[in-house]
Image (tube, helix red, strand yellow):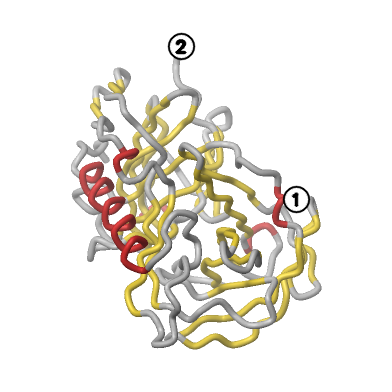
Amino acid sequence: MSLDISGTYTTSWQQPDGTFVVGPVIVVNAATIAITVDGYSIAKPVFAGSVITWQSSAGNQSSGALSFYENNGTNGFVGSYVEGGGELPQKNNLFGTSSQPAQDLSAWNATYNTFDLQNGKSTKEGTLSVTSPTVVHNGTTIHDYDYTGITSGSTSIEQLAWFVPDGNAENVVIQFSKDQRSGDLTFYGVKWTDGEQPNDVNFTGTTASTPPSNLNIAIALAAISVTNQQQNTTTEVEVDVSVDVSVAVDVAVAVAVLAPEDDFDGQPSLGSDLAGSIGNDKAAAEQLAETAERLSTAPRPDR
């Protein structure tokens, strides 16, 4: 039976310097041969079995070549991706997973104080209200948002995203977390109105009255555990996904703290459910980066 690659994919995007950031939200509809990237419909995509390719030369804002697989009932992909009109990288740099969130959106019901983050400085932006199934940003109801998640072992992340093509004022991708010390709900992510998706976290929120600690952070997001070698017989492209992501403490997300404020008190950093110190956070993220680097050497689908 052929693989149905339809789904909404949460992604991790490896940058040229080896760091990882939250990647674009990719929605695939195999029945209609359609794909969207951050809400924008891709023109002239090529579906060849479990491989999808597209080119910026067709009028798209990006190019991509993705090879899909299924592991334990969960779809994923590895592939190459570039924004703008640049050449696709020679190594895989985009990793995606399509799965149901571990918690309903109602788990994050709250009113969040929101902040724009630039050069380590937080500026009050407004509010975000989540009352599932309704999401309201600065008094305006969000249309057609995507709520997705990744679960690995006992750890999960939930991601909320909405985009301009669906009638919203801005493009936003955020991931929720709970402050292990205070119990405050928080989120971090990216926000932009047009052009390319920002690489750095620039939008945060919290149920507290003050912004989350201004840390210079880098998101290291890896695919959930993949322990089998998959063979794509349709395209004869073998994707080596035999690495054991569970070695990286069996988590889907970790935050590497690069430059804490002087008054940082050693509590778990934003987004981390595992580590109790900066050093542990950084080690977990480095392990994930090493794992993703091994994935990035897998043969990439032909363009």
User: Where residue 11 sits in the image (x, y, percent)?
Assistant: 44, 49
The circle on residue 1 is: 2
- What amino acid is at disc 1? Ser
User: Where residue 19 sits in the image (x, y, percent)?
Assistant: 29, 62
Pick the residue in front: 222 or 261: 261
User: Where residue 187 sits in the image (x, y, percent)?
Assistant: 59, 65
Mark 1 Cα-neighbour bin, 10 Å: few <14, some 14–19, many ≥20: few
Residue plotted at (50% across, 67% down): 270
Residue plotted at (27% across, 57% down): 286
Q: Is mark 1 on a helix, strand or loop?
A: helix
- What amino acid is at disc 2? Met
185, above or below 48, in the image = below
Residue plotted at (39% across, 66% down): 277
The circle on residue 150 is: none
Mark 2 or 1: the one toward you: 1
Pick the residue in front: 122 or 155: 155
User: Decide: marks 2, 1 in contact (CB < 8 A)?
Assistant: no
The circle on residue 106 is: 1
182, above or below 65, in the image = below
Residue 185 horizontal side relative to residue 20, left or right:
right
Mark 2 Cα-neighbour bin, 10 Å: few <14, some 14–19, many ≥20: few
Q: Distance between the residues labelled 2 and 1?
A: 36 Å
